[in-house]
Image: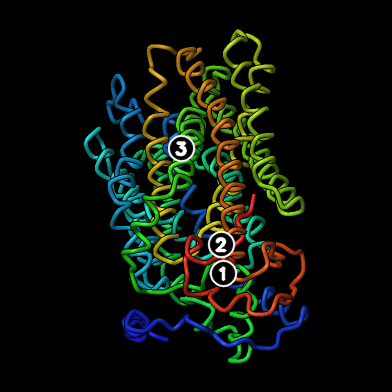
Amino acid sequence: MDFSEDVEASRTSSKHDENAHIQHVELTEEDSKRILRKTDSVILVILVWVYFLQILDKSVLGYGSIFGLQKDTGLKGNQYSLVGSIAPIAQLAWQPLSSILIVKVPHRILMPAMVLGWGIAQTSMAACHNYHGLLATRFFLGLFEGGCLPLFSIITNQWYRRAEQPIRVAAWYGTNGLATIFASAVSYGLGHIKSEALHSWQIIFLFVGLVTVVTAPFVYWKLDNGVTSARFLTETERSQAVERLRANQTGIGSSKFEWDQAIEVFLEPKTYLWVAMSLLLNVGASVTNTFGPLILNTLIKDKYKASLLNMPFGAVQFIIIIIASYAAQKAKLKSAVLVVLVIPVVAGLAMLYALPRSQVAACLGGYYLLAFLFGSNPLIVSWIVGNTAGTTKKSIIMSLYNAGSSAGNIIGPLLFNAADAPNYHPGLRSVLGIFIALAIVILIQLANLMFLNKLQSKKRVANGKAAVIHDVSMEDHYVNIDTEGVGEHAFDLTDRKNDEFVYIY
């Protein structure tokens, strides 16, 4: 399918509701496993690699600071903080349009366009010699990265069963840790290159930016728009892939922007609780991304060692993300795992606040405990998309979630003033309170979802159905829907309008 066919497919599907009353087809556990393997080998590989690049491009700013970025570009006062904050500001401004583009533009076109855009922006940062140049390029970096998290979340939801989603989100979101390890190693290696024409940080920016730029055409070559047009599946497998997703009750995608779904989003309290989680969590995450290397630099004066010491932090990130998502998938309970993840983060912040910087090993231990916070985002993302039906509704909610994330990334660096170095006590104290608030919000959302499930049971009884429905979408293995008539509206109704929808905790 070429570019013109992609566009035509988008126009056609926007005129007709192709997802209404899709017929049941025969599907076995062996069929489901085969389709899952094929999907992982194409779709998941793309998601993992591209998200890795997105995190890498976003995080190398901190390593640039270790290798003289601030001195070489003449940054003063809080200008470095503002350069770190401008990307999420751009993301925040872009979210309303992003939510529409994710629905209207075929994913095979949208994703490579985004990759190319932020790759060019990252590469251009190497040519910056002053504050204004850095500010402009980081703005466009944030702009093109703005749709990444919501797009990836929706793609995961449209290709995988609800039980499969946490570990798949963890796979691509886990590249937060891998990108941290890679960025540390690459910065250490490239930082040793002696050049009269380029500073070390310029070489780093050029390398990661160019890798991203050359990735864009490969994404267009391999990515498919959805299960119904997947080139790596046979015609029979495409129908079976749709059937695999029926029990999700969350749809398989549509290019029609539904305004009634948009209104529905803003009427539901759970929307604001999702956004609150994102905001609170990402205040802390931005602190580690932007100021992690600087905090290490106050502990370890050698810039090369400071760069390398961020590698264990990345390893802990990756391990925690995978373990937390696996635990949530097996327990079928995301909320409890999320609350548990807050505990070591609070402990780490308390250690950084209380311990003198002369106790290097203990301070490093406290800093590495902050890596537990990265286990939360993939769980919240899979929790959201698993509890939301309707393409437009998912797109808007994930864009709002990303807006909360962007706001958190704006606020986070501003809490840490250069005048507070090397202890940063006021900022650490603020973030400590924020994570305690996060745990409270998670528990409120859990209570809210329990209440919604009780309302769903009452709706089913009123409509002549069984009060309790077995949610087979959360089974470890594929199971056919065992209740007659259930799943007929799995692809064309929102969670609010579909009385068969079961909210997950």
Q: Is residue 348 left or right of residue 114?
A: right
- Residue shown at the point (47%, 15%) measured from the top left: 424
Rendered view: 62 above or below 255:
above
Could you say whether the residue bearing mark 2 is in a helix, strand or loop?
A: helix
Q: Amino acid at mark 1?
A: Asn
| Residue highlighted by disc 3 | 276
Residue 197 visible (yes or no): no
- Residue shown at the point (48%, 41%) measured from the top left: 273
Rendered view: 186 above or below 166:
above
Q: Residues within 10 Å of mark 1 (few under 14, many from 20)?
A: few
Rendered view: 82 above or below 374:
above
Q: Which of 451/315 is in front?
A: 451
| Residue highlighted by disc 1 | 463
Could you say whether the residue bearing mark 3 is in a helix, strand or loop?
A: helix
Labels 3, 2: front one: 2
Q: Which of 256/301 is in front?
A: 256
Labels 1, 3: front one: 1
| Residue highlighted by disc 2 | 459
